[in-house]
Amino acid sequence: MQKGEVVILRGNIVFTPEEKSFSVYENSYLVACHGRVEGIFTKLPEQYQNISVHDCGNGLIIPGFVDLHTHASQYGQRGLGLDYTLLDWLREYTFKEENKFSDPVYATHTYQAFTEEVIAQGTTRVVAFATIHQQSTRILCEILARRGVGAYVGKVNMDDNCPSFMKENTQKSLQETEAFIYEWMDHPLVKPIITPRFAPTCSRTLLEGLGKFAAQYKLPVQSHLSENVSEIKWVQELFPECKEYHQVYQQYKLFGQTPTVMAHCVHMSEEAIQSMRENQVIAVHCPDSNMNLTSGIMPLRKLLNNGVKVGLGTDIGAGHSLSMPQTIVKTIQLSKIRSLFEKKEEPLTLSEVFYLATKGGGNFFGRVGSFERGYWLDALVISQEAAVTPLSPLEKLQQFIYTGTPACITARYINGKKINF
Ligand code: GUN
Ligand code: FE
């Protein structure tokens, strides 16, 4: 074994191989080879004895966070216009902000700031919307790749029912998407994802073309689903041939034919839930966004009980923060509120939601989000000292999730590579 191929971290290792509880290994060694976890050891095996160890002292070693839905292009508008609900917010703020990405200089500034904040917050993998602009989308990919962040990036497609300055020509939209796919499909860390913005802003021809690309190039898909009551009503008017919103995506093969993430899924019929499960479409819960735009509360427990896979997303700029720990907290809080008026829906526990933010979402990237053997070593070192009373490793994790800041994260690894920060 060459020295450079092995990474060894020593500290208090905490992760969730399963939802129901944390696995805790105090004062142990986490060993990775060629970027992937070899094992966890209380005593370092002989063959690693001459390799240097990153000693994290009393600190925690946890998996990096996975943000399954966010808009890199809306980084500059965080916190703005959040007295609106979805459709007015899109019209009054979002489309205008995204229009600025026709300028590659503006895109570079925003995407650099976005990427640094993603890293600061301890997110190691992100599924992101860019904008309709091919050149700016490429810039986002280049910046993420240069910084070593794992990502799926979407060039947004929209050719209908939006302001003329954001409305793409259908054929050009498809051509540029295909060119973008060719540029990035073989990159090991930053990859393209098919990204119809949402059903209302896409023509049938566009959706059909995108469904074909997903199949032809074996690419995953991301979009929005059932976020807001007015949006759902609008979809019913625009696509009267579909009884339900999700059927629009389904009829164009954008609903689980390849791995698919759908943000929000707040207002879901039994049929829609069943279809999510059957097609293995992942629902992305975005609590800040749903509260800020008064969209509703996702029936998260019900989705899980019905076998739907779920991940978590920050959804900036409708969400106002790229913090996944805060997204975990809000998810738990919303599930508690929902349980008060939906008696069958028990609140979620910290280990369940930590799982969603690591291994649950990480599954979209392959073997990511856990420290089981064979998983990519995406890890954070947390060095938050308890202010008042000594804490166990698990208590330290609880306190970090609820009160931690980026300053508590003292090292970050992605695919076994230490990120300079
Ligand atoms: N639906 C369509 N576009 C968007 C967007 O940019 N943000 C959110 N939250 N929902 C959307
Ligand atoms: Fe979104």
Image: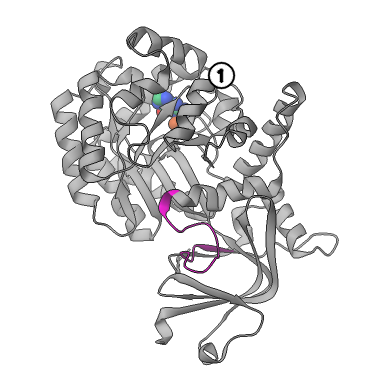
Q: Amino acid at mark 1?
A: Asp
Relative placement, left or right, of 158 versus 386 is left
Q: Is residue 370 above or below residue 81?
A: below
Q: Quadrant of residue 168?
A: top left
- Near mark 1 (Cα within 10 A), the count class, few <14, some 14-19 or many ≥20, is few
For the question of whether residue 194 can be seen, the reply is yes
Q: Is residue 384 above or below residue 336?
A: below
Magenta segment's dominant SS is loop
Q: Nearer the viewer, residue 421 or 28?
A: 28
The picture places residue 361, in percent across and down from the top left corner, at: 50, 47
Tell whether position 335 is magenta: no
The picture places residue 273, in percent across and down from the top left corner, at: 51, 27
The picture places residue 194, in percent across and down from the top left corner, at: 29, 37
Q: Is residue 369 above or below residue 402?
A: below
Identify the residue at the far right of this view: 389
At x 30%, y 17%, the residue is 162
Relative placement, left or right, of 25 versus 78 is right
Work out which quarter of the rendered image holds the N terminus and state it.
bottom left
Q: Nearer the viewer, residue 44 or 201?
A: 44
Rendered image coloring scheme = one colour
The secondary element bearing badge 1 is classed as: loop
Q: Which residue is mark 1?
A: 83
Q: Quadrant of residue 179?
A: top left
Which residues make up the magenta segment? 364-380
The picture places residue 382, in percent across and down from the top left corner, at: 63, 63
Q: Quadrant of ligand 1?
A: top left
For the question of whether residue 104 can be seen, the reply is no
At x 49%, y 45%, the residue is 67
Q: Nearer the viewer, residue 313 or 323?
A: 313
Total residue callouts: 1
Relative placement, left or right, of 232 versus 292 is left
Q: Is residue 132 above or below residue 375?
A: above
